[in-house]
Amino acid sequence: MKDLAGQVAVVTGGASGIGRGMAERFAAESMRVVVADVEEPPLHETVQAIRADGGEAIAVACDVASWSSVDALRDACTEAYGPADVLCNNAGVAGRGGVAEASLKTWEWCLGVNLWGVIHGCRAFLPDMIERGSGHVVNTASVLGHLCSPGVGPYNVSKYGVVALSETLHLEMQASGTGVGVTCLCPGLVSTNILDSERNRPERLLDDAGRGSLNVFSDDDESETLAAVREVYKHAMDPSVVGGMVLEAIVAGQFWLFTDGHFEGFIAERHRGIEAGGAPRSGRSIVETLLGRPLEQ
Ligand SMILES: NC(=O)c1ccc[n+]([C@@H]2O[C@H](COP(=O)([O-])OP(=O)(O)OC[C@H]3O[C@@H](n4cnc5c(N)ncnc54)[C@H](O)[C@@H]3O)[C@@H](O)[C@H]2O)c1
């Protein structure tokens, strides 16, 4: 996809972090942007900010975990700007917990947003792109779609799913010569509100114990570890940089988009381990990797 000016982009989870970075960058490129999010105050604030900067955008309240909501998003896009040229399936939440301990509600919430959200987006927008013979889908996965870490089972599973879906979709689009491109965005560490994603957990999927911790890593809200991880995120890559990378990947028709090199060695090591037929090695958890030190037991 070469000239993006005037093209229509839909960004889910567009009211914060990486999604907002993409929406703002697209609008700066004279694209018409449909910003979709479940959290309405920042959604409207984002669209106002884009318009104040001279960009063109509309806000659509949308819960990507719900098929009818994403179906309505596609209709709202078509009605406002016409069919989408670019779809960014980006909304995501950090579902924490070990495989044996995470509640079923946590699994449902995390897979509902992170994986079903991508499936819903593809199912709603792809038929039209294929019929028109052009378009580009950007799916936000993660380095945790390539590396497993103890303690983030639901998130890991959802992101491996997004990687598999994206690779499959790319092969299918190529095989049938549809003209539709795919990018699998695998951020490493980006300064966003992801650590506070419990803010968007729906009432019906609250854990029995209540809303619980805002901390994706521990039950202790104000733990030293959480404070240290927050500090790491505060100084991480700015989402606007990721927005620029995504724009370039769309123009170049690039499939893999890793935002930073932090995790390259770990991914290579995992691949070598698979080739050697070994079991996963007990390395550092994602938190230990982020902090660059082992956690005290
Ligand atoms: N920040 C990082 O370092 C990092 C690393 C790897 C992957 N990611 C992925 O990037 C994506 C964006 O996350 P972020 O880091 O910008 O976090 P963020 O919390 O700043 O943004 C996520 C957005 O998704 C929205 N959202 C949550 N549930 C939704 C739902 N059901 N329907 C629609 N929107 C919903 C939130 O309201 C929010 O605006 C996610 O898929 C996340 O897993 C982030």
Image (cartoon, helix red, strand yellow):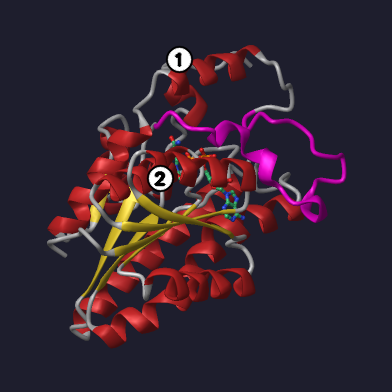
Q: Which quadrant holds the C terminus? A: top right
Give left or right: position of 250 versus 13: left
Mark 2 CB within 8 Å of ligand 1: no
Q: Are marks 1 and 2 in contact (CB under 8 Å)?
A: no
Q: Is residue 68 above or below residue 8?
A: below
**In the image, residue 159 lies in the stretch drawn in magenta:** no
Report x, y in % for residue 80: 44, 69
Report x, y in % for residue 17: 46, 37
Instruction: Tell me the residue at 63%/47% (across/down).
Output: 39
The amino acid type found where label 2 is placed reads: Arg
Looking at the rendering, which quadrant does residue 210 occupy?
A: top right
Q: Residues within 10 Å of mark 2 (few under 14, many from 20)?
A: some
The amino acid type found where label 1 is placed reads: Arg
Report x, y in % for residue 254: 18, 57
Give left or right: position of 55 versus 125: left
Q: Which residue is mark 2?
A: 51
Give left or right: position of 129 versus 100: left
Looking at the rendering, which quadrant does residue 181 occupy?
A: bottom left
Q: Is residue 75 above or below residue 163?
A: below
Q: Which quadrant holds the N terminus? A: bottom left
Q: Which region shows up in magenta?
A: 190-217
